[in-house]
């Protein structure tokens, strides 16, 4: 059925109705349209807005907390390594610096080798990531005693084995 035939059918239907009947159909169509607009558009939007207004104080509090945590993290990152962090066990300091560089999930193990030394085995990142991490550790008063890097040429990732020690006097 073409659009033109459909239009003619509706026109014929409309013209066959009395004026009073047409007016009732128009009123009914208006009521249906208003009901659809209210139920399908306005009511869901109003409900969503009310939900968001209820959640807004909680979301603002979460935002303030996140900002405070970011400020604290930045403050801790800017410290020079001669503060309370130096009092932490060496293995924890090594792991903490790995977390700061998003490397912690690639640490296979951190094994203590006495009071002031640890052996670290890690894998799954490019060599440059591990080198930057080791430089960062040096800045935190942690010395590199030995290092073995094995490169997987297919993936470009390395397996790292390092012995780290607390520098004397720190």
Image (cartoon, rainbow, N blue to C red):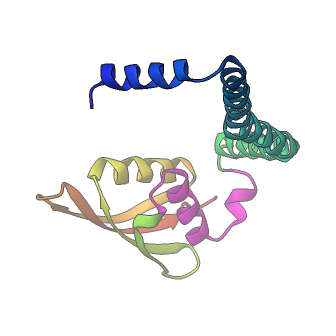
The quarter holding residue 60 reads top right
Q: Is residue 95 magenta?
A: yes
Viewer-closest of 130 and 36: 36
In the image, 15 versus 164, the foreground residue is 15
In percent of width and height, residue 10 lies at: 46, 24
Q: Which residues are magenta?
A: 82-104
Residue in the picture at 27% in, 52% down: 127
Q: Is residue 5 above or below residue 37?
A: above
Residue for point 56% across, 73% down: 116
Q: Position of residue 106 (x, y in %)?
A: 40, 65
**Which is more toward the observer, 122 or 39?**
39
- Residue 147 image position (x, y, % from top left): 31, 64
What residue is rendered at 85% in x and 47% in y? 58
**Image quarter of residue 54:** top right
Tally of numbered discs: 0
Image quarter of the C terminus: bottom right
Question: Residue 130: x percent and y percent?
Answer: 36, 54
- Above or below, 127 against 3 in this view is below
Horizontal side of residue 36 vs 90, given as left or right: right
Q: Is residue 35 above or below residue 148?
A: above
Q: Quadrant of residue 75?
A: top right
Observer-nearest of 165 and 128:
128
> Is 105 placed left or right of 97 in the picture?
left
Q: Residue furthest left?
A: 154
Is 61 inside the magenta-drawn segment? Answer: no
The residue under the point 71% across, 31% down is 28
Quadrant (top left/top right/bottom left/bottom right) for the N terminus: top left
Examine the residues drawn in magenta and state their main secondary structure: helix
């Amino acid at each position: 059925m073409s659009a033109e035939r459909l239009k003619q059918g509706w026109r014929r239907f409309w013209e066959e109705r009395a004026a009073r009947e047409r007016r009732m159909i128009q009123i009914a169509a208006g009521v249906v349209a208003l009901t659809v607009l209210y139920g399908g558009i306005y009511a869901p939007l109003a409900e969503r807005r009310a939900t968001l207004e209820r959640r807004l104080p909680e979301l603002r509090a979460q935002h303030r907390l996140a900002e405070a945590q970011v400020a604290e993290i930045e403050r801790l990152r800017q410290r020079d390594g001669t503060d309370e962090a130096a009092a932490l066990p060496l293995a924890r300091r090594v792991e903490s610096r790995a977390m700061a560089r998003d490397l912690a999930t690639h640490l296979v193990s951190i094994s203590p080798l006495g009071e002031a030394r640890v052996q670290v085995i890690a894998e799954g990142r490019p060599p440059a990531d591990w080198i930057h991490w080791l430089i960062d550790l040096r800045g935190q008063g942690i010395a590199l005693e030995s290092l073995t890097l094995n490169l997987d040429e297919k993936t470009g990732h390395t397996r790292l084995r390092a012995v780290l020690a607390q520098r004397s006097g720190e």
